[in-house]
């Protein structure tokens, strides 16, 4: 008898140009100084940049996304966000696990990111992946001069 596996309720795929409205909505709802549409469109063109999305298998809608760069032996996370209606369901965890896998497959030495000093939720999320704070960039954010904490996850 054939055993059929239940489909996963969510899956990760590369962002398509047609996802731009959904990604922009998540961006606007998630950040004080959201990136513009053009920034995302430019990211889709950059050879070293990736934007991956989490989709609901039922209808293909985008519930979360992550934007990262693969430069030399480093995976640098620029942006990660989950739609406010879809938070605490493990989507960011899914995306981070995926990026760790991408880093491993690409023989990256480390993953890095910057996070606002006040963003305790995100810092807790990264801490669960064993990222550690390794530096501070004073007045890093242009909109309000908040400091950024630099976090690092070494692969080996
Ligand atoms: C930070 C963010 C991406 C987390 O997305 P998410 O899909 O809700 O994350 P997950 O469901 O995978 O949560 C993973 C863990 O993060 C921590 N966390 C996330 N949201 C939290 C909350 N509201 N309160 C406490 N802990 C929280 C918890 O440790 C959580 O694990 P748990 O649910 O088992 O306790 C999301 O809150 C978001 O989009 N925030 C706005 C954008 C942002 O700040 N991005 C980070 C920029 S550096």
Image: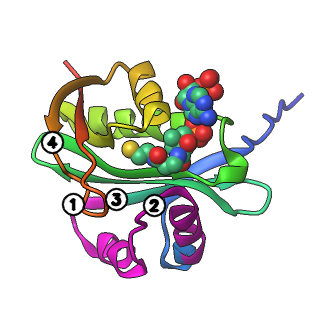
* Residue identifier under label 4: 137
Nearest the eye: 37 or 102: 37
Element carrying mark 1:
loop
Residue 115 at x, y = what percent? 32, 41
Looking at the image, tell me whether mark 3 or mark 4 is earlier in sequence order.
3
Nearest the eye: 112 or 149: 149
Q: Quadrant of residue 4?
A: top right
Cα distance in 3D space between marks 1 and 4 = 24 Å
Q: Is mark 4 within 8 Å of ligand 1?
A: no
Q: Is residue 16 visible?
A: yes
Q: Is residue 94 visible?
A: no
Looking at the image, tell me whether mark 2 or mark 4 is earlier in sequence order.
2
Nearest the eye: 3 or 19: 19
Cα distance in 3D space between marks 3 and 4 = 24 Å
Q: Which mark is residue 50?
A: 3
- Near mark 3 (Cα within 10 A), the count class, few <14, some 14-19 or many ≥20, is some
- Near mark 1 (Cα within 10 A), the count class, few <14, some 14-19 or many ≥20, is few
Q: Nearer the viewer, mark 3 or mark 4?
A: 4
Q: Which residues are magenta?
A: 21-49
* Residue identifier under label 1: 48
Nearest the eye: 13 or 77: 77
Quadrant of the rendered image holding ligand 1: top right
Q: Which mark is residue 32?
A: 2
Looking at the image, tell me whether mark 2 or mark 3 is earlier in sequence order.
2
């Amino acid at each position: 008898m054939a055993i059929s596996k239940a489909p996963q309720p969510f899956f990760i795929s590369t962002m398509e140009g047609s996802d731009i409205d959904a990604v922009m909505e998540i961006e606007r709802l998630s950040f004080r100084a959201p990136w513009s549409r053009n920034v995302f469109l430019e990211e889709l063109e950059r050879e070293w940049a990736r934007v991956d999305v989490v989709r609901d298998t039922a209808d293909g809608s985008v519930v979360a996304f992550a934007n990262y760069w693969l430069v030399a032996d480093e995976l640098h996370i620029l942006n990660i966000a989950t739609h406010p209606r879809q938070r605490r369901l493990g989507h960011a965890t899914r995306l981070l696990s995926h990026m760790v896998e991408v880093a491993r497959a690409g023989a990256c030495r480390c993953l890095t990111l910057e996070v606002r000093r006040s963003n305790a939720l995100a810092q807790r999320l990264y801490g669960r992946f064993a990222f550690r704070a390794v530096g501070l960039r004073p007045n890093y954010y242009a909109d309000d001069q908040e400091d950024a904490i630099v976090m690092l996850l070494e692969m080996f």
